Amino acid sequence: MKALVLLLFFIIPIQWEPSFEHAKVLAKEKNELILLNFSGSDWCVPCIGLRKEFLESEAFTAFANENLILVNADFPRRKKNSPATEQLKRNEALAELYNPNGVFPLTLLLTSDGKVVTSWDGKPKVSVEQWIAEIQTFCQANK
């Protein structure tokens, strides 16, 4: 049974909330922080590296699913990768508020009311485990 639970745990993909407003509601209900990631998924090499090495790692996925509300504001350049118009408008509004200089990747840790706790400009310069430990410290301080 334990093996089945572990198997299901690793099959469940990381959940990205498309609406920042809904993410704030969820964060408040769950008493969790929001991790907001600005990316250019089809053109930004550091963004692709951040996603593959950090955000899609088993360790981060397990941690995030239990401790964070995730929002990705993606700005792909290829038309085939463009988000729906409504999502693009939400992403642009987030960029105006949190990323006016267009830094990619930019990752922010926010409270449920949208206040910035900390941020990472570019890919973290530490291991995934060290990055998770850093985020965990902020999560614990928020409880």
Image: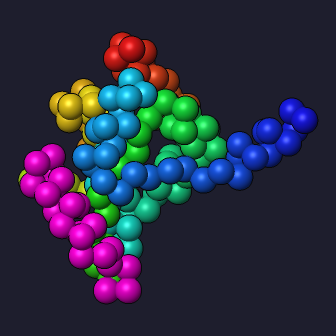
Q: Nearer the viewer, residue 56 or 83?
A: 83
The answer to whether residue 128 of the structure is visible from this angle is no
User: Which residue: 54% across, 39% down?
Assistant: 65
- Report how many numbered discs are placed on residues in the image: 0
In the image, residue 48 lies in the stretch drawn in magenta: no
Q: Position of residue 123 (x, y in %)?
A: 37, 47
Q: Position of residue 26 (x, y in %)?
A: 37, 37
Left of 66 or right of it: where is 26?
left
Secondary structure predominantly adopted by residues drawn in magenta: helix
The chosen color scheme is rainbow
Left of 109 or right of it: where is 65?
right
User: Which residue: 35% across, 49% down?
Assistant: 71
User: Which residue: 71% across, 43% down?
Assistant: 9
Q: Nearer the viewer, residue 93 or 136?
A: 93
Left of 102 or right of it: where is 55?
right
Question: Which residue occupies the extreme bottom position in the image?
Answer: 79
Query: Above or below — where is 99 with respect to 67?
Result: below
Stretch of the chain drawn in magenta: 79-99
Q: Position of residue 140 (x, y in %)?
A: 42, 15
**Image quarter in which the C terminus is found:** top left
Q: Position of residue 66 (x, y in %)?
A: 55, 32
In the image, residue 96 lies in the stretch drawn in magenta: yes
The answer to whether residue 54 of the structure is visible from this angle is yes
Left of 72 or right of it: where is 110?
left
Question: Which residue occupies the extreme right position in the image?
Answer: 1
Query: Above or below — where is 47 with respect to 135?
Result: below
The image quarter containing residue 84 is: bottom left
User: Which residue: 29% across, 58% down?
Assistant: 73
